[in-house]
Image: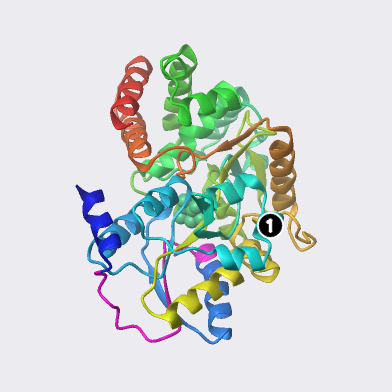
Amino acid sequence: MFKKTLMAIAMSGTMVATSVQAGEVEVLHWWTSGGEARSIAVLKQMVEDAGHTWKDFAVAGGGGENAYTVLRSRAVSGNPPASAQIKGLEIQEWGDLGFLASLGQVAERNNWDDVLPAVVSDVMKHRGEYVAAPVNVHRVNWMWANPAVFENAGVSIPTTLEELWTAADQLQAAGVTPIAHGGQPWQDATTFESIVLAVGGADFFNDVFVEHNASALESDTMIQAFREFRKVKDYIDRGAPGRDWNVATSMVIRGEAAMQFMGDWAKGEFTAANMQPGSDYVCMAFPGTEGEFTFNIDSLAMFKQRTAANSEAQLKMAELVLSPEFQETFNLNKGSIPARTDMDMSKFDSCALASMDTFIATAESGQGLVPSMAHGMSTTSTVQGAIYDTVTEFFNSNMSAEDATTRLARAIRAAQ
Ligand code: GAL
């Protein structure tokens, strides 16, 4: 029903003409944490330097659920913003509804097909045509650790799941909160998918989160993943429920917790706090996932415009997004790596270089590069929502791992 309404609006050409001035680009995003705000400010500056007006439309809420809700209501009222931070399969969903503008000419003029790896450009295209511009590639399966906290407690930073639980026990015995966690569905899902990767490996991850293969979903490996996930609960503090991800990062920054499991947007917070990787904080693959890469590509999709001036501003912004200058500055602030693989990486730190190496190696070998479920890369928003619900309910109840496995398989089937 909702889809039909949206499609009718997009097709009928009855979109309400916005009262915006020529050359304005309104951008909906959820980049409001310290590191995120510094990153998006780079684009604002560049758009303004190009002579256009930037209208900021920030909707707070990590992971973007709130932003997506607002986007839908703006679209339903026939007044979508010029551009929105839409990712992964959502791009296809909005493209199918007929809302998105083609970036074909900008892409061709600037050789996007040559500078972007296929794993990125595939996501940006709807029916073969560019409709979104990628700003970065985030790696999700990271662990952020405060080395001083580990050292003071005499504990080694873990590299496997087994070591993780041993380290967590030792940290707890030393009076430290081992894991900084924010109890929000998308954050639960972010940790859960890293555990699925650690327990089952990349092929299993794809069977579960991309293919939704019944035998993988109902397997003992899945039960094992839920069991491991439950253990996280023993090592988080009482303030975790509802906590924003960047508040959890600041616990690690301040030494109030030893580690956080989060994508490398967390690095943007360490950078904004003037901390240096290797000495002040440590980035390591989520325990048990070294050499694997869960990708999350942020992108700005462009909505059809009613005035030539606004279309021009929008196309200019798309061009700027792919410029090496933007890709460098934005990603230095954001914690991610550039979407372009032909970049000079000399200004990037050891975490970004490790990320780039693993990204390229996994993309070339075809082994270990997986799309993030928690961040909308692997499946539809409906299936993702069903997974979020089950994972969060499991985490916050006494549901057995066996029941969770059965329920997850059922929920995914129903949402497909
Ligand atoms: C992700 C997004 C990142 C980061 C994070 C927290 O979904 O891709 O860029 O912003 O949410 O808000």
Q: What residue type is labelled 1?
A: Arg
Element type at mark 1: loop
> Is 353 on the left-hand or right-hand side of 109?
right
**Neighbour class for label 1 at 10 Å: few (<14), some, many (≥20)?**
many
Where is the C terminus found, in terms of image quarters?
A: top left
Relative image position of residue 25 (x, y in whole percent): 44, 76
> Is 149 on the left-hand or right-hand side of 401?
right
Relative image position of residue 149 (x, y in whole percent): 61, 44
Q: Is residue 34 visible?
A: yes
Q: Circle 1 is placed at which residue position?
A: 340
Where does the magenta region start and end? 14-36
Q: Residue at x 39, y 40 (%)?
A: 380
Q: Count numbered badges in the picture.
A: 1
**Relative to 71, is 20 above or below?**
below
Q: Is residue 250 visible?
A: no
Relative image position of residue 46 (x, y in whole percent): 58, 78
**Relative to 311, is 396 above or below?**
above
